[in-house]
Image: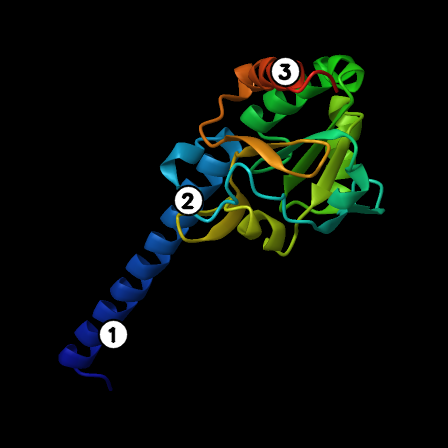
Amino acid sequence: MQGVGGSEAMKTREFELGSARMVVLIVLAVAAVIVAGGAYRMVSASSDKAPAVGAMAPDFTLNSQEGKAVRLGEYRGKWVVLYFYPRDFTSGCTTEAHNFQRDLAQYEAKNAVILGVSVDSADSHQKFCTKEGLNFKLLADTEHKVSEEYGSIMNVMGVKKLSARHTFLVNPQGVIVREYFAVEPAKHSEEVLVALTELQRSVGGK
């Protein structure tokens, strides 16, 4: 028969285990709320490893929502809006994507393409594009390698890695000419279009 001391010790261990589980659940719940609500300012993200303006944009190959390999270098001769975003279907990311889609004809008229990158799968991208009516390419960086190379990775509560909301404007020669690290999803497409117009004017065309 177990003594009083043993019973109390067991209760203490059970309490400690319960408390530990509760802490883990709280952390996961907070992370889920942050991801779902798009409150990404509450997580750690660093741009100090991003390639600098004036540098060649690091080349890469990722699968699109169509399951086809897409290489950045394929777009030499065009302007590229390379934007990283945290997650499909979340509010801020949906707003940002909608606005790029809204302005897509203007980008095409300026010889520019939109490429979105997140750590979501190609299947998730396909569903997101279908649901939201997106006609530009979303690329699946499921291993985080491209996001990390562009200094565009963040940790949500130390639990999950997501792409940070950063954008790189790449000229037809493959050089990064503008960078955006403090992106407001609702205004972003408009500011990129303004920058693209100014840059094209400064070089005398497209």
Give the SS element for disc 2.
strand
Give the SS element for disc 1.
helix
- Place of residue 53 in the rendered image (x, y in percent of width and height, measured from the top left): 52, 36
For residue 10, the mark is 1
Check disc 3: other Cα within 10 Å, few if <14, some if 14-19, many if 20+. some
In the rendered structure, the answer to whether residue 58 lies left or right of residue 63 reads: left
In the rendered structure, the answer to whether residue 60 lies left or right of residue 33 reads: right
Q: Please state which of the two labelled residues, at mark 3 or mark 1, is closer to the viewer.
A: 3
Q: Please state which of the two labelled residues, at mark 2 or mark 1, is closer to the viewer.
A: 2
Looking at the image, which is closer to me, 5 or 49? Answer: 49
Earlier in the chain: of badge 2 and badge 3, it is: 2
Q: Quadrant of residue 74?
A: top right
Q: CA distance from mark 2 to mark 1?
A: 45 Å
What amino acid does circle 1 point to?
A: Met
In the displayed structure, 192 sits above or below 46; it is above
Give the SS element for disc 3.
helix
Q: CA distance from mark 3 to mark 1?
A: 65 Å
- Which residue, as the protein is rendered here, is positioned at the far left? 5
What amino acid does circle 2 point to?
A: Ser
In the displayed structure, 174 sits above or below 23; it is above
- Which residue, as the protein is rendered here, is positioned at the far front? 204
For residue 22, the mark is none
Q: Quadrant of residue 39?
A: top left
Task: Name the residue tied to disc 3.
Answer: 193
Earlier in the chain: of badge 3 and badge 1, it is: 1
- Place of residue 116 in the rendered image (x, y in percent of width and height, measured from the top left): 67, 35
In the displayed structure, 13 sits above or below 139; it is below
Earlier in the chain: of badge 2 and badge 1, it is: 1
- Place of residue 175 in the rendered image (x, y in percent of width and height, measured from the top left): 63, 38
Check disc 2: other Cα within 10 Å, few if <14, some if 14-19, many if 20+. some
- Place of residue 24 in the rendered image (x, y in percent of width and height, measured from the top left): 38, 55
For residue 46, the mark is 2
